[in-house]
Image (spheres, rainbow, N blue to C red):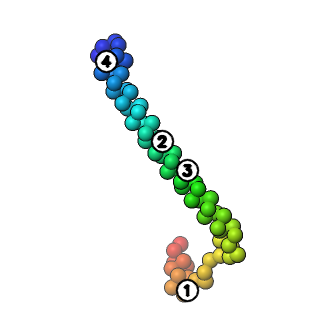
Amino acid sequence: MSGDNLTGTWRAILTTNIATVMVIMKTMMECLAEQDASNKATNEHLNASPVPSHHQPPMTPILRQQEDNFF
């Protein structure tokens, strides 16, 4: 390998790769921002809900039997 790796072809490859990484990072950040907005809206909706989120429906006999045999 040459001692000067940052000239010519190497510089073009690095520039292309950095540009690609920047596009990917920008896309990821946009997706995360959209997901964050969605999560905030969901949390606000859940906080306004009169039913507590930890409420579990009553277990049917089949589910109770499966839970008892789980361990």
Rendered residue at 70%/75% (across/down): 50
Label 1 – label 4 distance at C-alpha: 71 Å
Q: Secondary structure at mark 3?
A: helix
The reply to whether discs 4 and 3 touch (Cβ–Cβ < 8 Å) is no
Dot placed on the residue nearer the N-terminal end, 3 or 2: 2
Circle 1/circle 2 CB separation < 8 Å: no
Distance in Å between CA atoms under marks 3 and 2: 11 Å
Report how far apart the C-alphas of labels 1 and 2 lie in the structure. 48 Å
Measured from the top left, where is residue 67 in percent x and y? 54, 77
Identified at 51% across, 74% down, the residue is: 70
Q: Quadrant of the N terminus?
A: top left
The mark nearer the N terminus, 1 or 4, is 4
Q: Residue at x 62, y 77 (%)?
A: 56
Along the polypeptide, which appears first: circle 1 or circle 2?
A: 2
Q: Are marks 3 and 2 in contact (CB under 8 Å)?
A: no
The residue identified by callout 1 is: 60
Question: What kind of residue is marked 3?
Answer: Ala
Is label 3 or label 1 in front?
3
Label drawn at residue 33: 3
Q: Residues within 10 Å of mark 2 (few under 14, many from 20)?
A: few
